[in-house]
Image (tube, grey):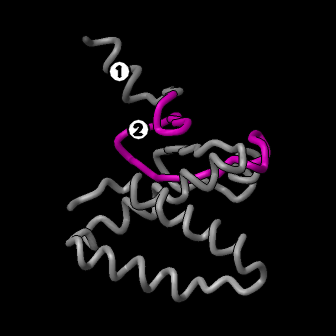
Amino acid sequence: MKYSPTVYSRALVSAVEEESRLHAGTLEVKKLTHNFVRLLEKNGDVKKIENIVDAIERVVVRARGGRLITVIMPRKFSARLLSNIKESFPPEDKLIVKIDERIISGVKIIFDDEEIIDNSLATALKRMFI
């Protein structure tokens, strides 16, 4: 049976939490990871691994009370600007920075894959001509 990346991610996070509760200090991450990959192979879902890893990250960040924040800019930016952006959010939040030249200039910020602040030139131009 095929499962969604979210189902896999919740299952793995639950297994790690249960293992760490039962065997505090002797968590066998290698064994859990090996068994998890074998399960993916058995179900024919290895091709979903990237989406599963993303879903695991979302589950862990949310469990810590944070948000997954994606900042999209048109070109690489300075370490100082990146530091300023990171300081704008609580430490529980996970910041992902992406480069997308199609936005021309400006920035897009996506919160938990839902809320979007779109101050890109590409969107402004679309609004003007649509």
For image coordinates 63% across by 46% down, the residue present is 62
* Residue 82 image point, x, y percent: 68, 52
Quick check: 96 left or right of 39? right
Marks 2/1 in contact by CB < 8 Å: the verdict is yes
Quick check: 95 left or right of 123? right
For image coordinates 46% across by 45% down, the residue present is 74
Residue 95, compared with residue 112, is above or below; it is below
For image coordinates 59% across by 83% down, the residue present is 29
Residue 14, compared with residue 41, is above or below; it is above
* Residue 46 image point, x, y percent: 28, 73
In front of the other: 123 or 68: 68
Label 1's element? helix
In front of the other: 68 or 46: 46
Mark 1, residue position = 125
In front of the other: 24 or 102: 24
- Real-space CA distance between mark 2 and mark 1, rounded to the nearest whole angstrom: 10 Å
Q: Amino acid at mark 1?
A: Leu
* Residue 43 image point, x, y percent: 23, 71
In front of the other: 60 or 116: 60
Q: Amino acid at mark 2?
A: Ile
* Residue 78 image point, x, y percent: 66, 56
Local crowd at mark 2 within 10 Å, few (<14), some, or many (≥20)?
some
* Most distant residue in the front direction: 22
Label 2's element? loop
Mark 2, residue position = 104
Q: Earlier in the sequence, mark 2 or mark 1?
A: 2
> Magenta part of the protein: which range?
86-115
